[in-house]
Image: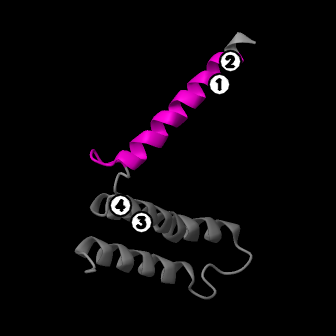
Amino acid sequence: MKITKTEKIWLAVVIIFYICYNLPFVPPYGLAKATLIHALITLVPLWIAIYVGLVKVCRIYRIRDPKTPGDQETSAPESADSNCCSGMKSDAAGK
């Protein structure tokens, strides 16, 4: 499996923000304002980069739909389950 350009960029951005977030003694201990600024500069972009990259990669590698038009095994149990559930709904509604 070949790594795409999108995955390389995503990995680089995540690693850069992760390293910046984990710099020792940044922000200085005991300063609340510096901690909030540090979080806005590093933690929030890290979260954004992770989720945006995840969406882009999931668009590249789509999950296959388990239903195929010619597959009889998946269609028969589904129809039996739907009949079973519809019967249960009507029984529950009648009581």
Residue 94 is situated, as x and y percent measured from the top left of the image, at 70, 11
Task: Of the two numbered discs 3 and 1 on the same chain, state the one appearing first in sequence.
Answer: 3
Residue 40 is situated, as x and y percent measured from the top left of the image, at 53, 64
Number of marks in the rendered image: 4
What's the mark number on residue 4?
none
Q: Name which residue type carries label 1.
A: Met
Lateral position of residue 26 relative to residue 31, left or right: left
Q: Give 75 or 22, whichever is nearer the viewer.
A: 75
Residue 78 is situated, as x and y percent measured from the top left of the image, at 47, 39
Between the C-alphas of marks 3 and 1, the distance is 46 Å
Residue 86 is situated, as x and y percent measured from the top left of the image, at 57, 24
Above-or-below relation of 13 to 60: below
Q: Give 91 or 58, whichever is nearer the viewer.
A: 91
- Magenta region: 67-92
Task: Of the two numbered discs 4 and 3 on the same chain, state the one appearing first in sequence.
Answer: 3
Q: Which residue is mark 2?
A: 91
Between the C-alphas of marks 2 and 1, the distance is 5 Å
Estimate how packed mark 4 is, as few (under 14), some (14 to 19) or many (20 or more) residues with alpha carbons within 10 Å. few
Give the number of the mark in front: 4 or 1: 1
Between the C-alphas of marks 4 and 3, the distance is 14 Å
Q: Characterize the magenta stretch by its predominant secondary structure.
A: helix
Q: Which residue is mark 3?
A: 49
SS at badge 4: helix
Task: Of the two numbered discs 2 and 3 on the same chain, state the one appearing first in sequence.
Answer: 3
Q: Which residue is mark 4?
A: 58
Between the C-alphas of marks 2 and 3, the distance is 50 Å
What residue is rendered at 32% in x and 61% in y? 56
Q: Look at the image and say whether residue 86 sits in the magenta stretch.
A: yes
What residue is rendered at 50% in x and 64% in y? 47
Q: Name which residue type carries label 4.
A: Cys
What residue is rendered at 70% in x and 19% in y? 92
